[in-house]
Amino acid sequence: MNWHKSDSFAPLILVFHGQQKYRSIRSLRQMAEVLIAAWPSFDGEEYLMAAKICLDAHLGTCSVNEARIALIRAAAEANIPVITVVPRTCDEQSTIVEGGASLVKGVHSA
């Protein structure tokens, strides 16, 4: 697994307190960086599991999605809000454009 590759890592945003409040996570490398440099507590069970699974995903012994899920669990344990980003597929985008519709805050209008 490429440490910097982000196309298989569904993006998410962690909301911290302090100067750099929002941390966008788009790759295993960014996940590792936030776990090492920005995490408020290094002794939580979910934190330790997320760090291990991040390394396992890098080594190819588990999936990137498993690492992402572990990060979300660690964030919940540390009371760090998570904003998940679900990218649309090309088919969904073309359907919206062709249909002339827009989707804003869950409200569909034609």
Image: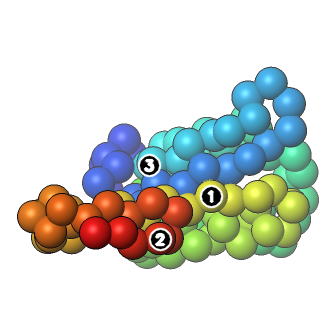
Q: Position of residue 55 (x, y in %)?
A: 53, 58
The residue type indicated by label 3 comes to: Ser
Q: Nearer the viewer, mark 2 or mark 1?
A: 2
Dot 2 alpha-carbon crowd within 10 angstroms: few under 14, some 14 to 19, many 20 or more: few
Distance in Å between CA atoms under marks 2 and 1 = 19 Å
Q: Classify residue 57 by image quadrant.
A: bottom left
54 sits left or right of 37 in the view: left
33 sits left or right of 17 in the view: left
Q: Position of residue 39 (x, y in %)?
A: 79, 45
- Residue 79's place in the image compared with 28, above or below, is below
The residue type indicated by label 2 comes to: Val
Q: Nearer the viewer, mark 2 or mark 3?
A: 2
Judging from the image, what secondary structure is the residue with disc 1 in? Answer: strand
State the residue position of label 2. Answer: 107
State the residue position of label 1. Answer: 83
Closer to the camera in the image, 11 or 104:
104
- Residue 4's place in the image compared with 51, above or below, is above
Quadrant location of the N terminus in the rendered image: bottom left
Distance in Å between CA atoms under marks 2 and 3 = 30 Å
Dot 3 alpha-carbon crowd within 10 angstroms: few under 14, some 14 to 19, many 20 or more: many
> Mark 2 or 3 closer to N-term?
3
Q: Looking at the image, how many numbered discs can be counted on the residues?
A: 3
State the residue position of label 3. Answer: 27
100 sits left or right of 59 in the view: left
Judging from the image, what secondary structure is the residue with disc 3 in? Answer: loop
- For the point 29% across and 54% down, the residue is 7
